[in-house]
Image (tube, rainbow, N blue to C red):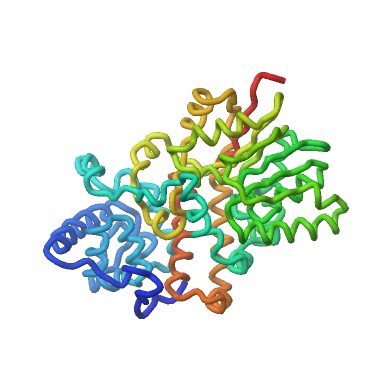
Amino acid sequence: MTVAPERVAANHWPGLDVVPSGPRAAVSARIARRLFHAAIGRLDVTVVEGDASFGRGGPTMVITRPEEFYARIGRHQLIGFGEAYLTGAWDAEDLGGFLRVLAAEMQHLVPESLQRLRSVVVKRPPRRQRSSTKNSRNNIAHHYDLSNDLFELFLDPTLSYSSALYAGDPATAAAADLEAAQGRKIERLLDQAGVGEGTRLLEIGSGWGELCIRAARRGATVTSITLSTEQQSLGRERVAAAAREHGFSADQVSIELCDYRDVVGSYDAVVSVEMIEAVGWQYWPTYFQTIDRVLAPGGRVAIQAITMPHDRMLATRNTYTWIHKYIFPGGFLPSVRVLDEITREHSTLRMAEPFSMGQHYAQTLRLWDQAFLAAQRQVLDLGFDETFLRMWHFYLEYSRAGFASGYIDVNQLTFTRDDA
């Protein structure tokens, strides 16, 4: 477990050092306390608050500063819940286990009568985070340009920052299995897209180049686009090294800084791995219209997408979340249903049967978090602080809880059209 910070430096984390106060905060804190106690009383967890404990038993949460904890969630709901963890107002030895129980009951934590007030209470995403052409590069840089060295500390040697696909039961997979599982995920996507000798492939969202490398080894010519300067730089280095090692030409791969909306050319296949989450729901039609425009006759599309149930997507698409504020500004998860509807309405693409692999992501995130926690000293040496350690640990375990509970999923989706 990461160490709770003794204090929060305002210059590093603007506003996080300020605990909500005043009459309005006091009232909202009292309401939050009652709602939280009522919700926990129905769950298989244990919450310790001073000398008291409540819940039906299970993974334990310890509230170390109750006044701060309830003030934060009273004023800022789930954002405040996450921020209270960052400041050390609460902790959990088995953070992922505790969050998994909450995630499994997410739709029922707040009474249904109060959920009708959601649009009044929750904050809306700021316009500056909308994933427009103007804002997208800043949104991507916020996360992916943190530090290549940071990502290398907890990812496997392929530097794949997306769900792996394990050969057997993902729950039994070990760290030694992660690299092969990441390769298996990529190879399946390339197979679904029909990538082989002579294929002109467009990759939307480069990562650090592993998919480019594997496609080039199949004989494809790859154009890969990204908005991350850090990923472009290291991706190009990795492609050049792989070309020397595996005997393909480095000229087969081009990694360019380019917004997906600006793509030109004609491609036999389009592959995109966990990039659609950054597009924003307002731009999903544009995303698929772009793919439709550049896809050659008979072409195929393979997308790996983190998804959520359709009803939850509709209920939360105008909600500003902790993930937006601290991890992925401008992001939003689609449902499988909405992607099918959008492609039918706005393109000639047609979706095949989805391939669900959510439990594979839960294990991938568990292994990432184990590696991250083991590398805490190196993370600090890179210039990050104790609050960042808690933030990243919370992010990885919060995400793992979503997949482990089934609240969110990840799917490989194949799209074709009848123009062969």
All told, the count of numbered labels is 0
Q: In this view, does 181 lie above or below 72?
A: above
Give the camera-side residue of 386 and 382: 382
Give the camera-side residue of 264 and 111: 264
Q: Is residue 78 left or right of residue 286?
A: left
Point out the image quarter for the C terminus.
top right
In the picture as drawn, the residue positioned furthest to the right comes out as 247
Estimate the x, y position of residue 173 in percent, counting from the top left: 63, 55
Q: Which picture quadrant has residue 230? A: bottom right
Q: Which residue is drawn at 35% across and 69% down?
A: 14
Q: In this view, does 374 lie to the left or right of 111?
A: right
Q: Which picture quadrant has residue 29? A: bottom left
Estimate the x, y position of residue 49 in percent, counting from the top left: 26, 69
Give the camera-side residue of 394 and 142: 142
In the picture as drawn, the residue positioned furthest to the left comes out as 23
Q: Which residue is drawn at 53% across and 52% down?
A: 362
Q: Which picture quadrant has residue 174? A: bottom right
Q: In this view, does 244 lie above or below 220?
A: below
Q: Which residue is drawn at 48% across and 65% down?
A: 392
Estimate the x, y position of residue 18 in percent, counting from the top left: 27, 70
Q: Residue at x 42, y 34 (%)?
A: 310
Q: Is residue 310 left or right of residue 264?
A: left
Estimate the x, y position of residue 93 in percent, counting from the top left: 42, 68
* Residue 406 visible in the picture: no
* Residue 329 visible in the picture: yes
